[in-house]
Image: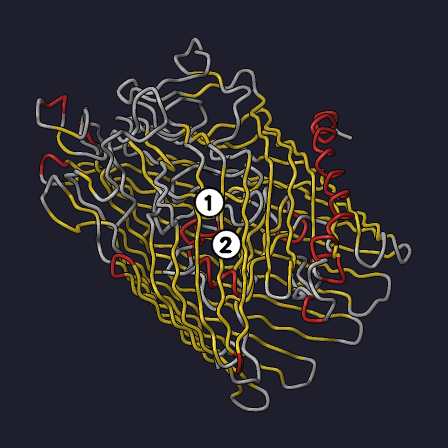
Amino acid sequence: MNPQLKQPFNLALKPLVAALLLSLALPLVATAAEDDDSLVLEEVVVTAQKREQDPQDIPMAISILSGENLDVLTAGGMDIRFLSARLPSLQIESSFGRAFPRFYIRGYGNTDFDVNASQPVSLVYDEVVQENAILKGFPVFDVDRVEMLRGPQGTLFGRNTPAGIVKFDSVKPSQDTDGYVQVGYGSYNRLNFEGAVGGAINDDWSARIAAMYQQRDDYVDNEYTGKKNDLEGYEEYAARAQVAYDGGNNFTALFNLHLRSTDGSARLFRANIIEPGTNKLVKDFKPGKISTDAQNGLTLDSIGGSVKLTWDFDRTTLTSVTGYESVDVFSRGDIDGGFGCGFCSLDNGPGFIPFAAESAVGVPDHSQFTQEFRLASNGWDTLSWQAGFFYFNEDITIENFSYDTLAGGAQNGYAVQRQQTDAWALFASTEYEVTESFILGGGLRYSDDEKTFKAERFQGPFGSGPIGPLTANPSDSEVSWDLSATYIINDDVNIYARVAKGFRAPSIQGRIVFGNTISVADSETILSLEGGVKSTLADGRVRLNASVYTFTVDDMQLTAVGGLSNVTQLVNAKNANGYGFEMDLQAYITDNFLVSAGLSYNNTEIDDKNLTVAPCSPLAGCTVLDPAAPNGGVYLDGNSLPQAPEWVANATARYGIPMENGRELYFFGDWAYRDEVSFFLYDSIEFTGQELSEFGLRMGYTWGYGQSEVALYGRNITDDTTIVGGIDFNNLTGFINEPRTYGIEYKARF
């Protein structure tokens, strides 16, 4: 065993032992329930290993959201960030609002806000990777399930998956006619429409069309301009059309076309909302008020499609998945978060605004093409295997703008980045039943990645002139692998161990509107060791899973953002280490009372005695806690990773009251919690986000045996307002979580 893995793994074993003991005691949870078949948890089928399996049989930590839980958590038009803390070890945040979500699993992610930034958490939608973070915000509607795979997934999913994967699978066409219509109305005149219809075209062809529309009025007053209800509104629609062919001749095909359009406010940055010397909001903070003198807006349009072709032979199955994605986005905002200019002897506020800062980013041209071929075994008794080839190509053009707010928003800076990425891989994975109780698995993947990058500045603010072109051409090849063992104790309980290596390809940071150089981060590699127990107890009424893990990342890519010059730079840390545990529980307490809970502990630490970064600007006035370095920076050794909460927890409870003629009154409560986080690589008092705890409630009435439903809902019902991110170069600027909302929804299924 890697000596760096040994000690934290031993520390993490204690929760696993506790989970094993708990699994023996949990049958008592269901003793109040009647012993009948209605009290069996729904069986779930996942494709975490690119074939249909029971998640209880897969030797890795997996969590799933599906069915009613998705309906509840997306109530009122919540975007993809609703998943944050709803699954163990998962954190999601964004400085772009409804666009550009950043995912973190087990404390491992990337805070880089550049639209060219790579992420160690991959998002896969209907078997097509969504590489660019802008693509990852596609709305969640007509989705069958969400799967989260924790730990490196390099063998089957390849590059840029060292932390894990979040995987979405939409409802597919079938020969049965079915669908639904859902409408909702809520706070801030929020309107939500969603619907789908599918069925047979003829004996061989079927189709399904799904669509959604959401809008929310502006509700934040701009006290500087005097405009009421000026900001934080949006309008968004998305659609998906799928056509499937199954002629009964061992060949199937699935065609998918999807699109999205968003128009609304960009993320609101709020100047000096943090009380100096604390990480609390200033006493007079009002979420519904802001004072800003710059423009704010976000537009996004994306379109994509995929073709899945499958040939079933006697002993093997050949699958081809071809995908294409394209996105166009433009976002402009007030980076200083206020108005005026203190250094210019002009009125300014809230608090002190040294100078005005207004910028924008656009992606006018983007395309992503992927192709995968895989051949898999079909009915080989004790042996199963799959092997394949994968190709990835992305072309992206990024425009960065700077504006002079004091001159009416005139453009004073402009730079362009262009990048092409080509990657390919060969992979193979196998699983062998040594005995009926002991299963071994393993996989191997060779990946090759190359980027061609060019950046040019055509107009520079503050008198700086053109620069460039600056170029970079990083490339690398890596071997990822995994080994696993599963021991089946009995039909209801198994234990497993897994060791895996993954990697993230080289990354480039080229925002040169203000800076004069580009930075390149070398590839990072991760070695992860995980062990766990999976159990189905109380005659199928209780499901308890637990895992412990430890990992070491070599040459970890980190993003140093902000500081006095607001320049973003990529660096490689020698190592970053992490360890922790996770638990998942679903249980029927009684016939009509279903509960679920999740808990995770994630400890992360940067291990590099020589690594330094620039802390917050003196203008920001934050209190830095790290030791100073001779170069004017601060040392990071021993710090936790940014946006990495130690504790993440969640719970849901549903209680139903059956009534005559297929009617039911139900109550559904949910809770999500994440511990405090550091916004940046360095530690400071002010830029440490407080813990965030959010509750939701839903009361519904169904009739027609669940075919029709009306429900009242509330999200963030305690109206917990928490700073969830910051900007550190100008003042104590921050942005906050979503406010309390409530509303009513009606849904009809057919």
Q: Is residue 59 found left or right of 474 in the rendered image?
A: right
Q: How many marks?
A: 2
Q: Earlier in the sequence, mark 1 or mark 2?
A: 1
* Side of 112 relative to 346 (left or right): right
Q: Quadrant of residue 126?
A: bottom right
The spot of residue 310 in percent (x, y) is 65, 73
The amino acid sitting under disc 2 is Asn
Provide the residue designation for mark 1. 92
Q: Which residue shows up at 41% across the image and 67% down it? A: 711
Q: Residue furthest bottom?
A: 202
* Front position in the image: 514 or 580: 580
On screen, residue 551 above or below 278: below
- Measured along the vertical axis of the image, is residue 70 above or below residue 333? below
* Residue 574 occupies quadrant: top right
- For the residue labelled by badge 1, is the local secondary structure a helix, a strand or a loop? strand
Give the quarter of the image for residue 27. bottom right
In depth, the one of 581 and 502 nearer the eye is 581
Single out the mark in the foreground, 1 or 2: 1
Q: What residue occupies the far right of the structure in this picture?
A: 435
> Residue 444: x, y in percent?
73, 48
Question: In the depicted view, which residue is nearer to us: 28 or 418?
Answer: 28
Position of the N terminus by quadrant? top right
Separation (CA) of disc 1 from disc 2: 26 Å
Q: Amino acid at mark 1?
A: Ile
Look at the image and tell me whether residue 289 can be seen.
yes
Which residue is rendered at x = 45% and y = 31% of the image? 559
Q: Position of residue 494 (x, y in %)?
A: 80, 51
Number of the label disc, if any, that sits on residue 393: 2
Q: Residues within 10 Å of mark 1 (few under 14, many from 20)?
A: some
Asked if residue 209 can be seen in this view, the reply is: no
